[in-house]
Amino acid sequence: MKLYLSFFKIRFKAGLQYRAAALSGMITQFAWGFMLIVMLGVFNGSTMAPADLSTYVWLNQALLALTAIWALDSSVFETIENGDVAYEAVKPVNLYTLWFVRNVAHRLSRCALRFAPILLIALWLPAPFTLRLPSTPTHFLGFLLSLALTVTIEVAITMWMYVFVMHTKSSLGIRTFFVALFEMFSGSSIPYAFFPIAFQNILKLTFFYGLQTATFNLYLGLAEPLSTLSIQFFWACVLIGTGYVAMQYKLKSFEIVGG
């Protein structure tokens, strides 16, 4: 465990060095956030309360590095594609756990530099752009627990992406497919409230719901904490368990590029 903690610290500190990128990212996220609030507000009607809509958008922008499927450690893809995974595989560590820890550290370091300024500024914006406070202390606690599960699910899905790239030897198609699919169904681009009710109910039973929507709905008081956390925990266990088995199986017959 100490070994993986050391890997986590190294990766986290490395991510904190990119302060200029974090600043430019914040500016981009503010511009994108304002645009989304205005654009979704045009189609909103009575779908979401204006304060809920703006809060949903700002939470999404502030926590993007944690909750976006594309905010992963892309260096692992390069390791697989150029054959350096052979060196990783012979290390006295579990490769799944190592990559999992690296991805968590990568996401946390990117988020740590930008989430607080975005949330603090959004709290003082005028209506309808303001970020409102959590509905209740209970929902805020549920939001924090749900956010931890969201990161777990995101990284577990990332691990599945690595497994698929081991089969294809190229990450381009896998990344394009996953980003398009998850941007649509995770609630990142379009909140679930804009989908038909029947489709919402189907999505709430899938892991897509646990990526962003469940977490933000808990903050807004639009979801019941216990059932929401239970669904997220279930999918986290399923994705980690199956992903771990799939990677161990693939490593036994993995063909190194150029070998």
Image: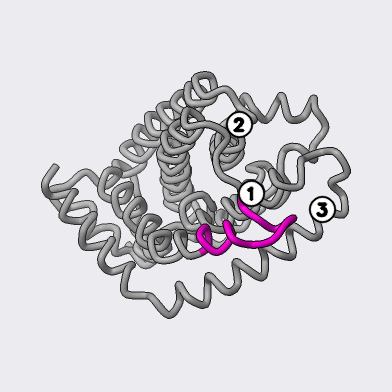
Tag 1, which secondary structure?
A: helix
Q: Is residue 246 above or below residue 112?
A: above
Considering every residue shown, the one lying at the far bottom of the view is 20
Q: Which mark is residue 55?
A: 1
Pick whichever, 139 or 124, lies toward us.
124
Q: For marks 1 and 3, give the CA distance.
A: 12 Å
Left or right for 76, reference 189 = left
Tag 3, which secondary structure?
A: helix
Q: Is residue 125 magenta?
A: yes
Quarter-wise, where is residue 134 in the image? top right
Q: Residue at x 57, y 51 (%)?
A: 59
Quickly name the residue at label 3: 41
Work out whether mark 2 precedes mark 3 in sequence or the reverse, and give the earlier one. Answer: 3
Q: Residue 209, can we see it? A: no
Percent coordinates x, y for residue 153 in the rendering: 46, 38
Pick whichever, 32 or 220, lies toward us.
220
Left or right for 25, reference 250 = right
Q: Residues within 10 Å of mark 1 (few under 14, many from 20)?
A: many
Asked if the residue at tag 3 contacts the one at tag 1, i.e. Cβ–Cβ closer than 8 Å, the answer is no
Quickly name the residue at label 2: 221
Q: For marks 2 and 3, give the CA distance.
A: 20 Å
Q: Residues within 10 Å of mark 3 (few under 14, many from 20)?
A: some
Magenta stretch, residue numbers:
118-131
Percent coordinates x, y for residue 214 in the rendering: 57, 34
Q: Residue at x 40, y 56 (%)?
A: 107
